[in-house]
């Protein structure tokens, strides 16, 4: 009554092979479109997971096995007693079909689980995006709050005995430009007066005066009394004689007081934004996604801000930006995430472009990069 099992298999293989060969020869483009369409449907429903692929394979195996089970297990008895064909087929096929149904049920639960995971991941992504843009708004508000104000006594006119004053202000981005000019001025005076050959020592003295104020540097014995007096006495003359520092003359009365009061909160919040993005789970946002967020943040920073950020790290005040932190963790926000990517070498007078490059690559020579090579994703754009 039944065709032998091997004949069934050979006939099935022959039919399937024939369909595949004819399809490849006669309808290659149509077959390719069908394959692409099926793959899209598969990825949309199941996702590209090995578990579902294996489960689908076993469903197919058990369904095929259910059709051949009666012929394999009891072919002789069926031929001798035809009245038991239906009962026997039902009893032999049912376990295989039940197993296939159980696997299909598992696949349904697995698909639902993956869908829930995707929804949770998408919600988390949206939450992080909202948090990032809120923090970015706070950062821009912090920049706008930076303020430098001074009153200048105007030269008296021969026909007026009244003193006339003019207010000079620098706000936001302009404040950062003036602050960098002040550091460059302090660095030049310190190099002229102290004759220090060690550039790192010269930089640390200059930045201490810039960030904490000249009185702090004197009280902590970083400079002596002679330098303290000479610095204050000669600085105003330098401002008027040197054309490069003429814009600073508008703020001559408030220079060298230190910028820690305003810049401290600015740097702490900026660091918090970067740390928040970098520490996001890679399953939510990968390295390229994080870089894209930080590009948006870095686009808010001028070259002067990036130079001052590097100085803040170099001085030790912002040591957590690059290298080992006190808790033993290593951060590489400058190298791996390019937070000072757009520095203009002309603004960085304390270190030339080669020193700047060497300083960072020595700390993290195997820095991360996008694409297939470091040359296509360099540490800096403006350094040539």
Image (tube, rainbow, N blue to C red):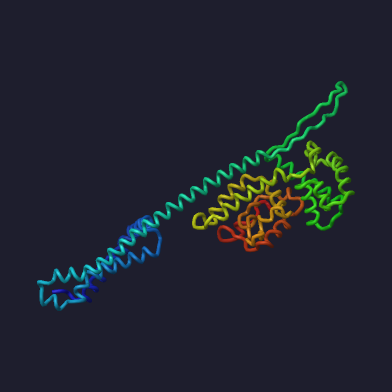
Determine whether 235 is above or below 46 in the image. Answer: above
Pick the residue in front: 246 or 272. 272
x and y, in percent, of residue 374 in the image? 61, 60
State left or right for residue 295 relative to residue 319: left
Q: Which quadrant does the C terminus fall into? A: bottom right
Determine whether 278 is above or below 14 in the image. Answer: above
Residue lying at the far bottom in this picture: please name it: 76
x and y, in percent, of residue 316 in the image? 72, 55
Q: Residue at x 67, y 61 (%)?
A: 361
Residue 83 seen from this side:
yes
Count the labels in the image: 0
Pick the residue in front: 319 or 286. 319
Q: Residue at x 60, y 56 (%)?
A: 377
The quarter of the picture where residue 169 lies is top right
State left or right for residue 353 relative to residue 50: right
Q: Residue at x 68, y 62 (%)?
A: 363
Residue lying at the far right in this picture: please name it: 226
x and y, in percent, of residue 200 in the image? 78, 57
State left or right for residue 62 relative to residue 71: right
Residue 29 seen from this side:
no
The quarter of the picture where residue 182 lies is top right
Q: Which quadrant does the N terminus fall into? A: bottom left
x and y, in percent, of residue 148 in the image? 73, 38
Determine whether 364 is above or below 152 in the image. Answer: below
Residue lying at the far top in this picture: please name it: 159
């Amino acid at each position: 009554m039944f065709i032998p099992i091997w004949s069934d298999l050979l006939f099935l293989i022959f039919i399937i092979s024939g369909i595949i060969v004819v399809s490849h020869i006669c309808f290659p483009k149509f077959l390719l479109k069908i394959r692409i369409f099926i793959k899209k449907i598969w990825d949309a429903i199941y996702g590209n997971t090995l578990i579902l692929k294996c489960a689908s394979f076993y469903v197919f195996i058990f369904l095929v096995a259910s059709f051949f089970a009666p012929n394999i297990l009891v072919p002789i008895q069926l031929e001798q007693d035809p009245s038991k064909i239906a009962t026997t087929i039902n009893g032999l096929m049912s376990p295989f079909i039940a197993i296939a149904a159980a696997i299909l049920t598992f696949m349904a639960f697995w698909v639902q689980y993956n869908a829930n995971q995707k929804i949770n991941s998408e919600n988390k992504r949206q939450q992080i995006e909202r948090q990032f843009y809120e923090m970015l708004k706070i950062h821009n508000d912090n920049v706008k709050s930076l303020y430098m104000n001074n009153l200048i006594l105007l030269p008296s006119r021969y026909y007026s005995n009244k003193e006339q004053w003019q207010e000079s202000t620098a706000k936001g981005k302009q404040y950062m430009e003036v602050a960098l000019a002040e550091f460059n001025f302090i660095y030049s005076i310190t190099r002229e007066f102290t004759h220090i050959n060690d550039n790192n020592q010269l930089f640390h003295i200059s930045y201490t005066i810039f960030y904490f104020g000249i009185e702090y540097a004197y009280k902590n014995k970083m400079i002596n009394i002679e330098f303290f007096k000479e610095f204050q006495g000669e600085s105003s003359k330098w401002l008027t004689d040197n054309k490069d520092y003429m814009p600073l003359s508008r703020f001559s009365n408030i220079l060298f007081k230190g910028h820690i009061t305003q810049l401290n909160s600015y740097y702490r919040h900026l660091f918090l934004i970067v740390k928040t993005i970098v520490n996001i789970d890679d399953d939510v946002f990968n390295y390229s996604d994080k870089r894209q967020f930080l590009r948006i943040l870095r686009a808010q920073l001028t070259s002067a801000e990036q130079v001052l950020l590097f100085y803040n790290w170099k001085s030790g005040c912002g040591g957590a930006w690059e290298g080992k932190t006190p808790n033993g963790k290593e951060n590489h926000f400058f190298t791996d995430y390019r937070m000072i990517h757009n520095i203009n070498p002309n603004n960085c007078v304390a270190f030339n472009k080669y020193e700047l490059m060497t300083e960072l690559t020595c700390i993290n020579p195997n820095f991360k990069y996008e694409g297939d090579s470091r040359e296509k994703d360099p540490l800096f754009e403006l350094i040539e």
